Amino acid sequence: MTIQLPDSGGALSAYEPRQEPLAVTSGTPFTSRTVFSAAHVVADPFADTSPDSAAAVDWDATLAFRRHLWSHGLGVAEAMDTAQRGMGLDWAGAAELIRRSAAEAKAVGGRIACGVGTDQLTGPASLADVQAAYEEQLALVEASGAQAILMASRALAAVAKGPEDYLEVYGHLLRQASEPVVLHWLGPMFDPALEGYWGSSDLDAATGTFLDVIAAHPDKVDGIKVSLLEAQREIDIRRRLPQGVRCYTGDDFNYPELIAGDEQGFSHALLGIFDPLGPLAAEAVRVLDTGNTAGFRELLDPTVELSRHLFQKPTRFYKTGVVFLAWLAGHQTHFTMVGGLQSARSLPHFARAYQLADGLGLFPDPKLAEERMKNLLALYGVTQ
């Protein structure tokens, strides 16, 4: 049985879907790496909303997906970029998501870390406003019992006059944090408003400021997440971190080699691509736990083509592919997104994502995935 899939030029070609999913099993906690999946939110498809309305979330399906990730031993990085933070999910929605997910994590014994930002600021803000907004969100995350991830702030990028403003704001927050946090450096390919973060568009200078923040408060930094899609820069930063501060890769292009590491160290993981790759990624890390780096790479290297496809420019729309694959995999009953973001990628993009994911065995029920792909194709006028 084949399915007709369009390419980027609109030409159709036959594809024969895989019949069996990849065999993976739930297992014990990881021993060699700390691994988080940044998780997407499931929209309520029956809510009467528009793209500029407050997000309507299907909480049952959203929390069920987090239980799926926890069941495979993955930690959940909540209310991050993958959850459409700042691209459909506002602070009120994110706060509710944090409260609900943290309570669910406590109930099932899952690990959770949550994004702390400044997205309640909707207009021009002062440095004091930015600091207060960060403080409000940090207090909520800590009260929920989750670990805090200090995310990059659009408002801070807009108001900061130079590196000293970043040192002041982050220094204050780190002194205030009750437990060690993760610092997240999100590059402008994920959010153009973050151009020049850490006070410079020169990445070497920005890296210096970033490391200065950490060096001033190493006891308050559990780790860093670097999302610049430059493997060598991450390695260079990793080698310059103070003793005991972890590097969580956020590089959705080069994660296998960064997690595997080299003779001088390795990265842990906090990745959006581990949302669709969850069970396979967990299987690979358990192989790595045995010391079998080659086996780990054998499992994870073939996934990079899919990840690079989902995260292709404009990179910030990778969430659309992530949710699309969650629908095909049966984790949700529909392909709609908060903010109407399901329209952010093309039909040929979806077709290629389906083909690559199917080839990896990511769909627990390949027949269901095929049927849903055919339904989408029919909606776009492609008959089989």
Image: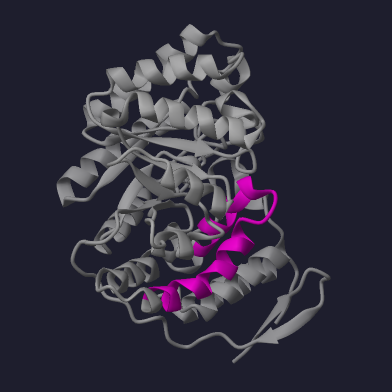
Taking the spot 64% from the left edge, 30% from the top edge, the residue there is 193
Colour setup of the view: one colour
Q: Is residue 45 visible?
A: no
Question: Magenta span has 348?
Answer: no
Q: Position of residue 222 (x, y in %)?
A: 30, 38
User: Residue 108 in the image: x percent, y percent?
Assistant: 17, 51
212 on left or right of 193 = left
Residue 82 drawn at (x, y percent): 49, 46
Q: Nearer the viewer, residue 319 or 155?
A: 155
- The reply to whether the magenta stretch includes residue 321 is yes
Tell me: residue 109, above or below residue 113: below
Q: Which residue is depicted at the point 41% across and 38% down? A: 79
How far across and how far down the image is residue 160, in percent? Answer: 58, 15
The quarter holding residue 33 reads bottom left
- Residue found at the very far bottom of the displayed protein: 1
Is there any visible trace of residue 236 in the rendered image? Answer: yes
Quadrant of the image containing the C terminus: bottom right
Give the magenta part as a residue range.
Answer: 296-325
- The residue sitting at the front extreme is 263
Q: Main secondary structure of the magenta part?
A: helix
The residue sitting at 44% across, 53% down in the picture is 271
| Front position in the image: 183 or 122 | 183
In which quadrant of the rendered image does the N terminus lie?
A: bottom right
